Image (cartoon, rainbow, N blue to C red):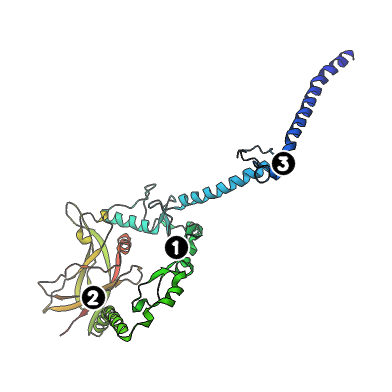
Amino acid sequence: MSGAEEREPGAGGPAASSSSAASSSSAGLGEAAGPVAAAGPEEPGLLLGGARPHAEPGADPDAPPKKRLKVAGAGGAEGSVKLEERLYSVLCCTVCLDLPKASVYQCTNGHLMCAGCFIHLLADARLKEEQATCPNCRCEISKSLCCRNLAVEKAVSELPSECGFCMRQFPRSLLERHQKEECQDRVTQCRYKRIGCPWQGPYHELTVHEAECTHPTKTGNELMEILDEMDQTHKKEMQLYNSIFSLLSFEKIGYTEVQFRPYRTDDFITRLYYETPRFTVLNQTWVLKARVNDSERNPNLSCKRTLSFQLILKSKISSPMECSFLLLKGPYDDVKINPVIYHFVFTNENNETEYVPLPIIDSVECNKLLAAKNINLRLFIFQIQK
């Protein structure tokens, strides 16, 4: 007992001293915290909620609630901005590094390509006689191997984008409608443009301009001059349709679906060209040939791409055969072609037309044709009988 009694004071000594130190420490903390609590919102160095501006984001979870609130608020604001930036970098096209504007395609490994770049890669591969590959992982890509990524298309459509007129931000899916119909700063033209008013300006100034526009007060002679110019322009536009209507009244008319297939020349530096199988129209045998950029040496290095074609008569004829012909898009293709009528007189000695332009709208449409496995068009031939 005496030994235990002797040890109790020794054992209780450090405990008592530590508890007294803790109480004195907590008392010190209480005294130090007292002025802060008393200062409240009047102290200029404090943020909302009583947190100090020098508090670090990596706070202890056991820290006071006010300090954790400040850290969460600051981290949330920075996190939202960084998330948006990360989405832009994750959802962008691997070729042009821009957000897709329409369809999104992906390779078998999931790398994304916008529709324009995807078609361009396929067209380049066709021109170079190579297999198209993904720029990231070099796996093979084609229209049959790649598929659209609808989830990415919807995600991109919801990302904010800035209006080029009013600088406000809208979801990308609503931006086009806003710029065309709703934006008050969009560029518009005067309603009297057709009678010569050249004014262009923001939409919110249109009403004021039209109230002051002098063109509605033009004299009859001035209006007649403007109408004459409009009639000339309209006449040129209608000339093609009038020609087609007159050709449709001919006795001998033939048309067929033609399929251009890609081939290579036998030259040392091979060149891409297209040719159709033989087909029969108007009881004659024909062939169509086409070439890219008029057989330019390296059309894959050119941004501007065109197609030209020639019509070849394979049959022997007893007398000259005068024909008009035109190519239109096939029934299942979405390529845009402006119809142009060509004329030629076929003989046994002169049975091939010159190469004439295939009237596609631009290089984008040309790339669509080149990216396809075959080019499907519709040919009309009208025989002119005198």
Whether tag 3 and tag 1 are in contact, CB under 8 A, the answer is no
Amino acid type, residue under disc 1 in the picture: Phe
Q: Which of the image's four quarters has the C terminus? A: bottom left
Image spot of residue 115 (x, y percent): 39, 59
* Disc 1 element: loop
Spatial separation of the CA atoms under disc 2 and disc 1: 42 Å
Which residue is labeled 2 in the image? 341
Amino acid type, residue under disc 2 in the picture: Ile
- Of the image marks 3 and 2, the number of the one nearer the N terminus: 3
Which residue is labeled 3 in the image? 39
- Of the image marks 3 and 1, the number of the one nearer the N terminus: 3
Q: Residue at x 75, y 30 (%)?
A: 28
Which residue is labeled 1 in the image? 165
- Which image quadrant is residue 330 in? bottom left
Amino acid type, residue under disc 3 in the picture: Ala
Q: Residue at x 16, y 68 (%)?
A: 354
* Disc 3 element: helix
- Which image quadrant is residue 350 in? bottom left
Spatial separation of the CA atoms under disc 3 and disc 1: 49 Å
Image spot of residue 292 (x, y percent): 24, 61
